[in-house]
Image (cartoon, rainbow, N blue to C red):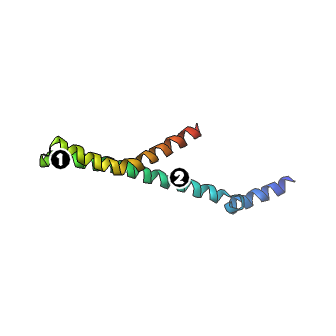
Amino acid sequence: MSTNNKKVQQQRIDEFPDAVGLSVIRRAEKREGTRSSIALFYVIGYLVIIAGVLIMSAIKNFTISDNKDMLLAISGILSGPLGFIIGYYFKAANKEE
């Protein structure tokens, strides 16, 4: 292949990234960014909910037993998906290294 043909081919690749699948890579990167944002939002939301329960219990003067019951109920519902999210991202980080 001549040098001229290589330049023309490179120019086509630059003009039409779909020709070599570059847009697929960009979409995958965008999708991963979206997943990371959702995971971060979930973790922060989980911590905010736990903090809210603790603040509410301090304001309303709940007993230790009431606090324990509320935290067990909330963590029982929300900690399963939280564990899945954290496990997924730590596993992904280990594969990159």
Is 65 positioned to the left or the right of 93 in the image?
left
Q: Nearer the viewer, mark 2 or mark 1?
A: 1
Q: Which residue is mark 1?
A: 57
Q: Is residue 15 above or below residue 54?
A: below
Where is residue 71? Give x, y as percent. 26, 46
Q: Which of marks 1 and 2 precedes in the sequence?
A: 2
Residue projecting furthest to the top = 97
Is 1 positioned to the left or the right of 69 in the image?
right
Q: What residue sits 74% from the left and 61% below the top?
A: 12
Report the front residue among 46 and 20: 46
Marks 2 and 1: CB-CB under 8 Å?
no
Q: What residue sits 55% from the left and 38% below the top?
A: 94
Q: Is residue 48 visible?
A: no
In the rendered structure, find residue 90 and report the number of the disc placed on it: none
In the rendered structure, find residue 32 and report the number of the disc placed on it: 2
Q: Residues within 10 Å of mark 2 (few under 14, many from 20)?
A: few
Is 90 positioned to the left or the right of 23 in the image?
left
Q: Residues within 10 Å of mark 1 (few under 14, many from 20)?
A: some
Residue projecting furthest to the right = 1
Q: Is residue 60 visible?
A: yes
Report the front residue among 67 and 93: 67
The amino acid type of the residue labelled 2 equals Glu
The amino acid type of the residue labelled 1 equals Ser
Where is residue 8? Give x, y as percent. 78, 59
**Distance (Cα) linking label 2 and label 1:** 38 Å
